[in-house]
Image (tube, helix red, strand yellow):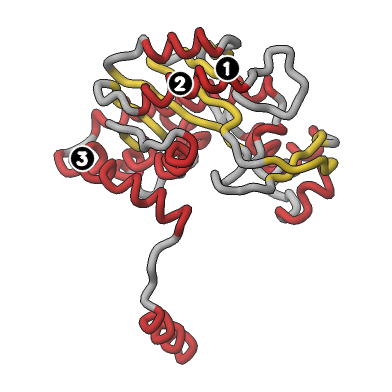
Amino acid sequence: RGKYIRILSAAKAARMLDSVTTGDLSTDIETTGLSPYDTCVPVWRDITDRPKWIALAKQEKAPKRTAYGRTFANFGTTMNADIVAVGWATEAGKGYCVVRNHTHKDPHAWTRKDRRIFDAAYRRMLRRRTVRKIIWNAVFETAWFLKFYKTPPLNVVDGMAGLAMTDENSLKGLGPAGQAHTGMGYWSQEVDALSKAVDHNFACVPIKDINKYLGCDVDSALRISRKIEKTFNKHSSRFVNKWYPRVIEELARMECAGAAADKKAARRFATYTRVK
């Protein structure tokens, strides 16, 4: 693994992002859930019996989603969807993280002004064509970028799509992929379990866990992408670097807003499947 540092100052983080003008930058965000348009995200006060929850998750015996909060957390209030933390890396073995908005007490909590300073710099980075953005599952991230930063990432490569081109049967999750291709180990398993316990709301996952998790995320995505792109043939390279980036924004919009469907064809298909 590597060295992962939380940047406490929004102004310093903004300067760091502005200083990246060429090369690769791997980035990732942690959010309050799966949709950037949710206006009623549950906030959990605490995760009870953390060791038991992690043990169950590792054994794949965790209860269904409807039971997560009742069993392992105390329900607090609700919040609007938000980006909780942002991470980035420009070299293997070193990652940076900022915590934008969190529900736990934090002496370094950012104000609205701090968030505006950082968000402006992050948006500039997303639009900087001279920097290649490496993102794992870029469709998910792009949906949030469109909502909060009003822009898709420009000059982007999806590491998960690249992995699929080299081995379509491999596990696409960044944790298992990192274990298989970087030797970093399965670093995400514990935090994945904690995030499920709070319905994927990272604003309720302890900050110390977010820092390490996000640092490993961006470091692993950078390492994997650089490793597998060396194995691309001409067609794989064209798909990952040219064709797929063109449809990421549209796929992200479809995930959020849906897409028009042919109702007549859908009814015909439904009838066919019932007969069969």
> Which residue is at the far left?
234
Q: Nearer the viewer, residue 242 or 147?
A: 147
Q: Image point 31% across, 34% down: which residue?
A: 157
- Amino acid on which the number 1 mark rests in the picture: Asp
- Whether residue 183 is visible to the viewer of this picture, yes or no, is no
Q: Residue at x 28, y 41 (%)?
A: 245
Alpha carbons under labels 1 and 2: distance apart: 18 Å
- As shown in the figure, which amino acid type bears the numbered disc 2? Trp
In the image as oriented, which residue stretches furthest toward the front? 113
Residue at horizontal 27 percent and vertical 16 percent from the top: 22
Q: Secondary structure at mark 3?
A: helix
Instruction: Give the Cα separation between the discs numbered 3 and 1.
Output: 36 Å
**Furthest-bottom residue in view?**
275
Q: Earlier in the sequence, mark 2 or mark 3?
A: 2
Position of residue 78 in the picture relative to residue 99 (left or right) = right
Find disc 1 in the rendering and name its residue: 114
Tell me whether the residue at label 2 lies in contact with that at label 3, contact meaning CB atoms closer than 8 angstroms. Answer: no
Q: Nearer the viewer, mark 3 or mark 1?
A: 1
Q: Nearer the viewer, residue 40 or 56?
A: 40
Q: Return the residue nearer the eye: 4 or 124.
A: 124
Q: Nearer the viewer, mark 1 or mark 2?
A: 1
Q: Amino acid at mark 3?
A: Lys
Task: Report which residue position mark 3 lands on.
Answer: 242
Callout 2: SS: strand
Residue 71: x and y, percent? 84, 47
Give residue 189's position: percent from left, percent from top. 62, 34
**Is disc 3 surrounded by few (<14), some (14 to 19) or many (20+) residues within 10 Å?**
some
Q: Residue at x 41, y 30 (%)?
A: 181
Q: In the picture, which quadrant includes the C terminus?
A: bottom left
Q: Which mark is residue 88?
A: 2
Query: In this image, 177 relative to 83: left or right?
Result: left
